[in-house]
Image (cartoon, rainbow, N blue to C red):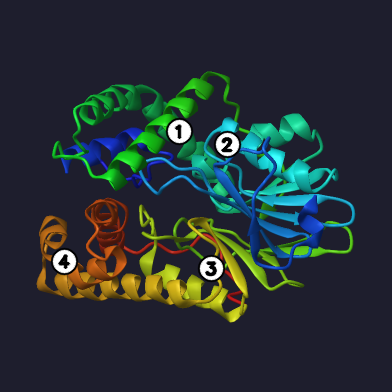
Amino acid sequence: MNTSHGVKVFGWVFALMAAFLLASPHAELRNGLSFALADSVPKRVELTRLANGVYAVVRREPLGLAVNANSMIVVGSEAVLVVDAQFTREATLETLEVIRSLTSKPVRYVVNTHWHDDHLAGNQVYRDSFPDVQFVLHENTRADVVALGGPNRDGTRGGAPPLIARYERLLAGGLGADSLPVSNGERESLTSALRIIKQYLAELPSFALTVEGPAVKDRMSLDLGNRVVNVLWFGRGNTRGDLVVEVPDGQILAVGDLLVSPVPFAFNSHPAEWRSVLDSIARRAPVAMIPGHGPVMRDAAYLRQVQAMLADVDEQVRIALGRGDSLTTMLKTITLASTKQRVTSGDEWTGKLFEQFFRGPAIRAAARPATPPRTTSDRR
């Protein structure tokens, strides 16, 4: 399997699937309280009020071969900012329904934290609903949505359908991705992923890349009326254009796929620089962080765990390169066994995700020859 562009499921669904086969009452709520939405609002999201006018929309789908991204909603006196759309327009409409349950103010900005489709394919929903909306991306991401996003979409369109059919046959026979009896966790994850990717494929014929708006280099401040939101770039990490969105008056950050729980995504990442980016995030002293996928984080414990995982990979790859080991050898010998046990607690399905989402991709990324960054972060 060719992984030269990374193999994240949401832009490269067919490749990762193949890899597995091969191997208003709201104003009364206090900060941090999650609450049930009205019956009309879909149950696949959980809304959490983090501060006055700041909300996390966390997806409830299990982590797996296809998921939708979390979003942050920031409400000012004049307008709304949203961090990330979702993989499908169907899911993005769910986020929009949540927004409309909170405020009638227009969405002025959508910040896409990076170029993967699970964070921006639903942008069309905001353009259709708010004609003046602006999409804010890092300058590297603006290039990548064209150079990498288009080919990935084409590959998914052609490659995913036969793999979907095979997964459905396996599940119908009580089998999982490795043709062994399927666990409850794996069944739930695969069933959810198949539903999402089939919806994505159904929407692809009418897909239009929708990213018109300003490009960020190092930082940009956006005024929503009596509230300023900072959009920051600290360097290359999960991608070369990861944006961090800060609500400074609430010490709340949306960090995209720089943090994903319970297993980080390391496809085509920059492990050494990623660790430094996480340091820059920690220095902002956030009281809450919204990851790209997974629950809201209230402290830096998971951030430090991811840093340690990346440091372990970097060190072991450095030693292996010093011995002259090939990438093939490293993928066999660098097992990250203790890290895997900590992350998965022995759960078999989470272990498979660890292998496909983190261990293999992180080793490949760390072993890749270093390339200079296109821009320089202020690292503040």
Q: CA distance from mark 4 to mark 3?
A: 29 Å
Question: Can residue 212 be seen?
Answer: no
Q: Which residue is mark 1?
A: 196
Residue type at the position of mark 1: Ile
Q: Position of residue 51 (x, y in %)?
A: 73, 66
Q: Residues within 10 Å of mark 1 (few under 14, many from 20)?
A: many
Compute the Cα span from label 2 to label 3: 22 Å
Going from N to C along the chain, the mark reached first, 2 or 4, is: 2
Q: Are marks 2 and 1 in contact (CB under 8 Å)?
A: yes
Q: Amino acid at mark 3?
A: Met
In primary-sequence order, the first of circles 3 and 1 is 1
- The residue at the point 61 percent across, 80 percent down is 285
Query: Mark 3 highlights which residue?
Result: 297
Of badges 1 and 4, nearer the viewer stands 1
Disc 1 or 4, which lies upstream in sequence? 1
| Residue 126 place in picture, x, y as percent | 71, 36
Q: Which residue is under mark 4?
A: 334
Give the secondary structure at mark 2.
helix
Q: Which residue is mark 2?
A: 91
Q: In the displayed structure, does residue 138 sit left or right of residue 178?
A: right
* Upstream in sequence: badge 2 or badge 3: 2
Q: Quadrant of residue 9?
A: top left
Tell me which residue sits at (49%, 21%) in the image.
202
Q: Please say if the residues under marks 3 and 1 sit with CB atoms less than 8 Å apart.
A: no
Nearer the observer, 367 or 187:
187
The alpha-carbon separation of the residues under discs 3 and 1 comes to 25 Å
Q: How dense is the environment of label 2, judged by Cα within 10 Å: few (below 14), some, or many (20 and up)?
A: many
Is the Cβ of the residue at disc 2 closer than 8 Å to that at disc 4? no
- Assign a secondary structure to mark 1: helix
- Looking at the picture, which amino acid does disc 2 mark? Ala
Amino acid at dot 4: Ile
Question: Distance of mark 1 from mark 4, alpha carbons?
Answer: 33 Å
